[in-house]
Structure formats: structure tokens, C-alpha cells
Amino acid sequence: MAERTPEDRLREEYFVLLPDVRRVIEELEAQVRHCLLPLSSKLDRYERLVVTSRVKDCESALGALRRRQEGATFDSDKAASYTLTALNDLAGVRVLVFPRSRWIEANGDLRQRFYSWTSDPVLADDLGEEPLAFKYHGYCAASARVCGELQIAPMLIGLFWQVEHSTIYKPSPELKGVGRSLEMRQRTSDVLVALKAFENEFERLVRLDPLSNHGIKPPGASN
């Protein structure tokens, strides 16, 4: 009988861990929603706060662990040493917020609640010191084996990532050349800069005059 490969062992481990992953998702999402309830209840009509969750699928988890290894391959002689519990994002919750001031506020509220979790922000060299998104990982009471990940991102950037993820970050085989293109990387960077500039300008104008300068009339104003 052929010896099991590292991938075979990891696929088996994935389905052993899956109940824990689902419990972590349920607990983490519930805690996040409860923590953000005071903020979400006072949002203005143009402001947005959306909480979503996802379980990393089996092959994606294997791929993520494989990329961490030397040469991005598993060593059959070390098959027993690999474990999916080394991944921080088997169970993930994402919070998308608009505009940026509410994003900062949401992060502050969540950081107080998850103060013991490890910070691992998503950085971008060309956007200054401010991260693209805040990100934390740690353990919930639901499981001592599976780590949970929490990401708080500006909504416009988060929505762009949903498109960029499958076309640039993890493209299908026919799109790998596009993802490696220096020109495409530059355009991606340009989009991120533009989205941040859009939000900053929007909030600047709202602060200057939240009603009369933007086609919004105060209650009781005549036509």
C-alpha cells in the first residue's frame, strides 16, 4: 500500500478540524457584531458597516501552508510535521466600513475587545504609514486548536480586493501572466491610492459643510 503523501495527511486533518473552525467562526462573528452594535446603530444614512465570515476551504488551506515551505513544496520525509493549525486564517471574519473615519472607529472598538490578539496589518509602501487594513489573529473560547482571524478594512478597498483576489492575487492558470505584470501591479497600486483619496476628499467636504454644499437640505428648508 502506497504511503500517504503530506497532502493526504493534511486533507484528513482539515476535516478533523472543520467542526472547530465552524465553532470559531460562529463565536468570532457574534462577538464582533455585538462589539460593533453601538457604532452600527448610530451610522448616518450614507455610512456603511458590513460583517462577513468565511471558512478557508481545504485546497486553499493546503496551498497557503505549501507556500510557507522552502521551495513552496512539501517534503515527504517530514509529512508528519506539517499541520494546518499553523495557519492563522482557517476561520476569518471581515469588517468593511465606509467612510474611513468610521473604519478607524470600528478598529478602535474591536481592538479594545480583542486586545490580546496579535496585530498583523496589511501594509502598502506607497500609502504612507497608515495600513491598507487592520488585521488580528488569536484564539476564541470555542477552540484551543484553531486560530481565528479578524480583518477590518475600508469598504471600497475591501470590495476591490474581492475582484483583485481572483484576478491578480490568486489568478486562474490562464491569468498568471497578468498577475505577474509589473504594469498591472502598478495599476493595482494606483487603484488603492485613488480609493483612499476618494474617501479622504469625501470626508473633507462633509466636514466643511455636511448639508448645504452637497445638495442636502436641512429639515424645513424651502425649495
Image (spheres, helix red, strand yellow):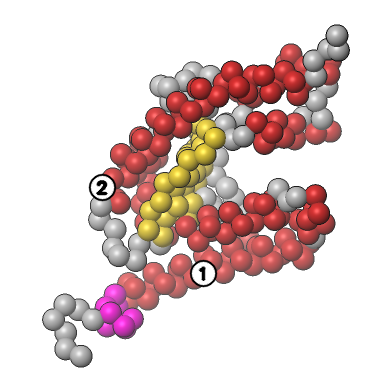
Instruction: Tell me the quarter of the image containing the N terminus.
Output: top right
Residue that appears at 40% across and 37% down: 29
Mark 2 crowdedness (10 Å alpha carbons): few <14, some 14-19, many ≥20: few
Q: Which residues are magenta?
A: 209-216
Name above or below for residue 130 compared with residue 121: below
The amino acid type of the residue labelled 1 equals Ala
Answer whether labels 1 and 2 touch (C-beta < 8 Å). no
**Could you tell me if residue 78 is visible in this image?**
no
214 in magenta: yes
Mark 1 crowdedness (10 Å alpha carbons): few <14, some 14-19, many ≥20: few
- Report whether 189 appears left or right of 43: right
Q: Which residue is mark 2?
A: 38
For marks 1 and 2, give the CA distance.
28 Å
Mark with earlier residue (1, 2)? 2
Q: Picture coordinates of residue 80 (x, y %)?
A: 74, 13
Residue closest to the far right? 2
- Mark 2 element type: helix
Residue that appears at 47% across and 56% down: 154
- Report whether 110 appears left or right of 173: left
Q: Which residue is mark 1?
A: 197
Residue closest to the far top? 1
The amino acid type of the residue labelled 2 equals Pro
199 or 85, nearer to the observer = 85
Main SS class of the magenta portion in the image: loop
